Amino acid sequence: MSQPVRTYRPVGALVVAGVASVSLLTVCAAVAFALPAQARGSFTVAQDVTLGVLLVAALAALFGIARTRVRVDPDGLHVVNGYRRHDLSWPEALKVSLGRGAPWAVLDTSAGVAVPLMGIQRADGQRAVRAVRELRAAIAAHGPSDERSLS
């Protein structure tokens, strides 16, 4: 059976990561240009490097949030949570759940491991519920129904 390629991304997290990145860069640039030359000159190289490293670390964390996704294709599920990637074949995927109060969906695997699906976040409301239903249907379509629980 041919599974269409589908990608799920968290809308709220993408917006927050984008707005926070632009805001952080804007504030840093505004402060750098607003400081008088005497104040800018009083920073040591070590202090400049430290501020640069902190800026890069914050932007890297926000980029990790922005790249979070769940991709479904004929080969299986490809989950990216920040900088961690999980590639699962269809037989490995058993059950997707979005528990009451849970921040994101979770995929139970045949290896007994629960993989968080941070690309499907409860904060996205009905969009997340629809994504979980679609994933459940895709999992059911790719394997024996006696091994799969859709609760």
Image (cartoon, grey):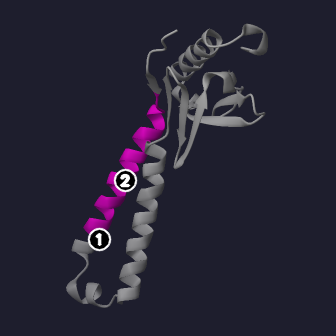
Labels 2 and 1: the sequence-earlier one: 2
In the image, residue 128 lies at what x, y percent?
55, 23
- What is the secondary structure assignment of the residue under circle 1? helix
| Relative to 80, residue 139 above or below | above
Q: Which residue is drawn at 27% across and 84% down?
A: 40
* Range covered by the magenta-colored residues: 8-30
The residue where tag 1 is placed is 31
Whether the magenta-drawn stretch holds residue 41 is answered as no
Q: Residue at x 47, y 49 (%)?
A: 64
Q: Residue at x 58, y 18 (%)?
A: 135
The reply to whether residue 139 is in sight is yes
Whether the magenta-drawn stretch holds residue 26 is answered as yes
Q: Which amino acid type corresponds to the residue marked 2 in the rendered image? A: Ser
Q: From the viewer's perspective, is 71 left or right of 107?
A: left
Give the number of the disc on residue 150: none
The reply to whether residue 97 is in sight is no
Query: Pointer 1: residues within 10 angstroms few (<14), some, or many (20+)?
Result: few
Which of 115/52 is in front? 115
Give the number of the disc on residue 21: 2
Q: From the viewer's perspective, is 102 left or right of 44?
A: right
Which of 90/23 is in front? 90
Of tags 2 and 1, the one toward the viewer is 2
Query: Pointer 2: residues within 10 angstroms few (<14), some, or many (20+)?
Result: some
User: Is there a contact, CB below 8 Å, between mark 2 and mark 1?
Assistant: no
| Relative to 114, residue 21 above or below | below
Image quarter for residue 118?
top right
* Mark-to-mark CA distance, 2 and 1: 16 Å
In the image, residue 7 lies at what x, y percent?
45, 26
Q: Which amino acid type corresponds to the residue marked 1 in the rendered image? A: Val
Q: From the viewer's perspective, is 29 left or right of 90?
A: left
Q: Which residue is drawn at 49% across and 40% down?
A: 68
Main SS, magenta region, reads helix
